[in-house]
Image (tube, rainbow, N blue to C red):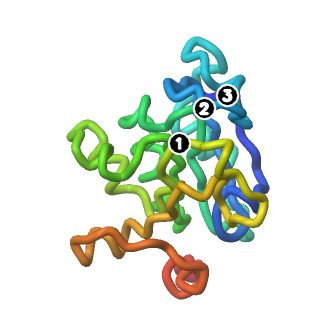
Amino acid sequence: MRIANTISDSIVDGAGLRFTVFTQGCPHHCPDCHNPDTHDPRGGEEVTPEAIMEQVGDNPLLQGLTISGGEPFLQPAECAALAALAHQKGLDVWVYSGYTYEVLCGAPEYRALLDETDVLVDGPFVAGKKSYDLRYRGSANQRLIDMKRTRAEGKLVLWEQADSLAHFTRPPS
């Protein structure tokens, strides 16, 4: 997979301490994007999901893995493989996308990544709706979707902070 970079200890890319992977390549080109260096699909570097999980290691403080961008759904199979490896380690998986949930659900090639996603932050960044008061998202149009509950209930369910500890606790080692 092609990535721009990683951050080993993020507290802004989802609940808890997270390992964040920024994928390379993005078709959205949102005005005022905070990661414009990820837009070029030829930039960044090639790595395997396994190599990324080696970087993750066995940090007992990590709650999860976040796959951001760029646009993760440009590399759905690779990102799904990475998410599956994170789940095997007991980590939850958040995925940020400039596409909406409704668009993603309509494309079968995205199913595997959606199935490996615990929280989907969807929608493009809209500079006019930017707010620093929002948790885990850049603009008010973006939604935090609890994918586990959405799948179980058969309807879109928004993620709530109170759910995070009961919903995504790691199994005991």
Q: Is residue 55 left or right of residue 161?
A: right
State the residue at coordinates (52%, 68%).
90
Front residue of 85/97: it is: 97
The numbered mark at residue 99 is none
- Determine the CA span between mark 1 and mark 2: 7 Å
State the residue at coordinates (72%, 33%).
32
First of labels 1, 2 by sequence position: 2
Callout 2 amino acid: Cys
Q: Position of residue 164 (x, y in %)?
A: 57, 79
- For label 2, the SS is loop
- For label 3, the SS is strand
Position of the C terminus, as image quadrant, is bottom right
Front residue of 110/47: it is: 110
Q: Which residue is tagged 3?
A: 4
- For label 1, the SS is loop
State the residue at coordinates (66%, 30%).
31
Callout 3 amino acid: Ala
Front residue of 76/160: it is: 160
First of labels 2, 3 by sequence position: 3
- Determine the CA span between mark 3 and mark 1: 19 Å
Q: Which residue is tagged 1?
A: 124
**What is the crowding at mark 1: few (fewer than 14 residues within 10 Å), some, or many (at least 20)?**
many
Q: Is residue 41 left or right of residue 114?
A: right
Q: Position of residue 26 (x, y in %)?
A: 54, 26
- Name the mark nearer the viewer: 3 or 1: 1
Q: Are marks 1 and 2 in contact (CB under 8 Å)?
A: yes
State the residue at coordinates (53%, 80%).
171
Q: Which residue is tagged 2?
A: 30
